[in-house]
Image: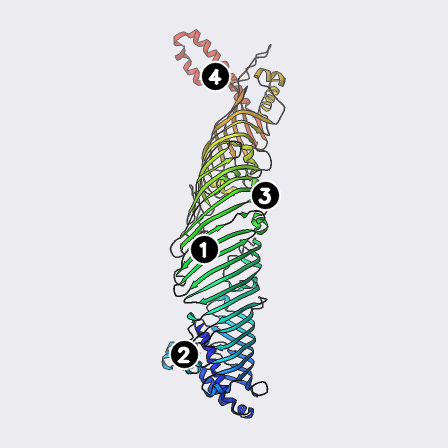
Amino acid sequence: MKKLLSILCMLFVVVILLLGAAVAFSPFFLNKYKDQILARAGEAVNRSIRLGDIRLTIFTGLGVRLKDVSVSNAPGFRSEPMLTMESLDVKIKLLPLLAKQLQADRIIFQTPTILIEKNKAGLYNFDDLIGAQQASGSADAAEKQEPHAPASADDLLAGFFVSQLEISDGVIRYYDAQTAYLEKGLHIQELDFSVQELSLERPMPFSLRFSIDHYADDLQLTGTLGPVGTEITVDIVPLDVRVMIPKLALKPLMGFVEEPVYIIEDGALTINTNISGDPTAGLTIAGDVAIHKLTLRDPEDNTIFTQGFSLDSTNNISVSLTRQKIVINNIDLAVNRARVTLSGNVDTFMDEPSFSISYSSTAIPLQGWDRILPMLEGITMDGSIKALGSVSGSFETKITAVCDISSPNFIMQLEDDQIASLQEDQGLTDVLAADALAADRGAALPPTSKPLLPENLFVKGAVTIDKGLVNQVPFSELKTDYTTVGNRVTVTNFSVKGFGKNGFAVGTFSADLASDPLAYRGQLKATRIDLAAVQKLVAPTQGLVEGECKTAFRFSGAGFELEDLEKHLKGRGNFKVNNGLINNVNLKEEILSVLAAKYGIPLAALSQMAGIDIIESEQTSFEEFYGVFKVADGSILVQDSTITSQDHGFSASGTVGFNQQMDMRARMILKKVTDAPKKKITYYLIDEKNRKYIPFRLRGSVAKPEVMVDVKALIKGQAGQVLEGEKKKLKEKLGPAGEEILKPLEDIFKF
C-alpha cells in the first residue's frame, strides 16, 4: 500500500511539474516541445511516456488537458502499458505555484487503466519506480548497473494540495505469477473516485465506487483519510470509512481458489460497516455483514452440501497492528432464526496467531434445517438447542474447544422411506450401528485414511436433553460427556431414560475418525427397555421380538456398511426379555402340526396330550426370554437361550446372520404331558433335567422362519428310552455283576 501511494504521488508530481511549467506557454509551444518535456518527465519515473495532445484551457479555468496518455511497463513484464488514460484535465492555481507550492482546483482522470504485475521472483512492475532492482535484471546485472534513483519529491509534496480530484470509469488489472488462481488476473472495473481537498497534511473527504470483474453491482467506500504526511507512513494514517457492498456475487470468486473444500454454486455478500482509527493505534470495525442464499456443492461426490443458506452478522471488532491484536468486542450471528454471540481476542495475528474466543447462543429452533442442509432430507426436526463454549489456543501448537449443548425439547422424525433404506442397508445390525455412532478402535483395524480433524485439536463438552421424541418414541434426561483428542472421540457418562415407561440405559463409546472405515468400541447397559419402541427407531414395521428387555453388550468394529459389519463387528452380551412376543411364527402350532401329521393324530388330541393350549395366531407369547450371545464373522451366535411360559418353554442355540438368515437348534419343553386314553405314544424325549421335550430347528429368513421338527433326534431319543428300559431290566436280572457285563453294550448302543 505504501509503495502504491508513493507511485501515485510521484506521478502527480510529474504531471503537476509538467503542467505547471506549461501553462505559461501557448499550445503551439507545448506541442512543439512535447517530446523534450515528456522525456524529462520520463526520466523522473524511469518510464517512457507518450502523449497524444496537449491543450491549454482558459474559459473553464486556467489549466491543461492531456489526451491519450500512456506510460510504459517495466522491462521483463507484459508489453502493454503500465498506465493509459483517455484524458487528464488539470486546473492550476498560479499564485501558490510562484511560492513553490503545488495547488490545483481540479484534477480529472478520464478512463484510466493501471496494470499491476508480480513476477515469479516476487518483483512488481513498479519496483523500479521507487528505486528497487529492475524486474528483468539478474543479480549480477544489478551489481554492474546501479538502479536509477528517482528524484526526491519531499520538498514538492510539502505544499501539495488539490481542491478536487476525480477518477472516472477507471480500471485496475492485477496479475500474480506466484499464485495460480491470479495468473489470469483480477480486474477492478467501473472505478469512480472523488476526493475533496487532496493534501498530504490534512484529512481528505473521499468516495470510491467500483466493481470486481463485473461481479459486484456496487462496491462503495466513503469517509475521510489522512493526514497522510509527506513520508507516507501508511501504518499511522487516520481514517474514518464506511464500506458498503449491496451485492457481491460469490460464485465467480471460485476462480481465485486453487483447491476449494466446497464449490460455490450461488450466493451473494453484502457489507455495511464503519472502519475508524488508524492501523497502529487501533482500528474499530463496526457494522453488518450478510450472506444471502448460499449454495455449496461437494467437489468429491458432487452432492449439494447446503442450499439457500443465509447469515446476518453484526460486528464490533478492534484491530491494532502495533500490538498485533484483534479484540472481538461482539459478533452477533443470525442463521435461520438461530443467534450466536462471540467475543474474545486474537494475538500476534501477523506471526503465530493465538486466540481465545467464547460463544453462546439463544435457543436455536431446529425446524427448517432440512431445507438448508440437503443431507437432512427426510429428517424432520423440531424443538430447540442451546450452545455454550469457547475456542482457544494456536494453530501451530494446540487448539482447545469447549462446547456444551442443551435442549429442553428435541423432536426428530425419520420418513418411512429413509428408515426402510437404513433397514435394507444394515438389516439386524441397525440398533447396534445406531448405538455405536461413537466408538473405539477394535481388533483387526482397517488402514487409516486422511484425518478429518487436526491432530492438535482437543474438544470437550456435555450434551443434555430434558425430553425428546424420536420416531414417536419418547425419552428424557439424556446426559453425556464427550472429548476428542485429534481424531479420537470418546463419549462417557452416557445415560437416558425412556424407550418404555421405566426404561433406562447407560454406556460409553469411542471412535477413531482417522480410520477408514471408522473404527469404534463401546459398551451399553439397559434395563426395562420396550423392544417395540426401540424397533420403531429403525424399522417401519413390527419387530421380530417384543417385550421389556434388560441387556448388557460390549462391542467393537469398523464401518457401518453390511460388508464392514460382517468383517469387523465383534461383541458379546446377555439379554432378558419379560412378557413378550415372537412375531411372524407360532412355534407351538408349527411343531405340534408336524408331529400330528407324522403320527396321524388329530392336532387337538396331540395338543391335549402335550398339555398345551393352541391359539390361532402368528405369534409366540412367552413370560421370559433370556440368554447370552456373541457377535463375530457376520452373525450373532445365540448361546443357551431359554423361553418360558405357563405350560411350555423353549431352549435354543444357533446363529442369526446379518443377512437375516438363521439356523437354530431348539427344544420345545413340555410341562404337562398326558397319554392318549387307548394308545401310548412316547413322542417326547427326556432332557438332562428330566424334562420332556421335542427337538426342532429354525431355518431360513428371520422375517418368516421355517420350523422343522428334528424327527431323527426324536426317533433316536425314543429308541434310547426303550434301550434304557431294557438296560434296567437286564441289570435287575444280572445282579451286582450287571454293570461290568453291560459296559460293552453301552458303548455299542450308547445307553
Of the residues under marks 3 and 2, which one precedes in the sequence? 2
Could you say which disc has been placed on residue 418 in the image? 3
Instruction: Answer whether labels 1 and 3 touch (C-beta < 8 Å).
Output: no
Residue 712 lies, in percent from the top left, at 53, 22
Residue 472 lies, in percent from the top left, at 58, 38
Amino acid under disc 4: Asn
Real-space CA distance between mark 3 and mark 2, rounded to the nearest whole angstrom: 69 Å
State which mark lies toward you, 4 or 3. 3
Task: Name the quarter where the C terminus is drawn.
Answer: top left
Instruction: Answer whether labels 3 and 2 touch (C-beta < 8 Å).
Output: no
Q: Nearer the viewer, residue 413 or 411?
A: 411
State which mark lies toward you, 1 or 2. 1
Real-space CA distance between mark 4 and mark 3, rounded to the nearest whole angstrom: 50 Å
Q: Name the residue under label 1.
A: 343
Q: Dot 3, crowdedness within 10 Å: few (<14), some or many (≥20)?
A: some
Amino acid under disc 1: Ser
* Image vertical order of residue 382 relative to residue 585, above or below: below
State which mark lies toward you, 1 or 3. 1
Q: Which of 617 and 363 is in front in this view?
A: 363
Of the residues under marks 1 and 2, which one precedes in the sequence? 2
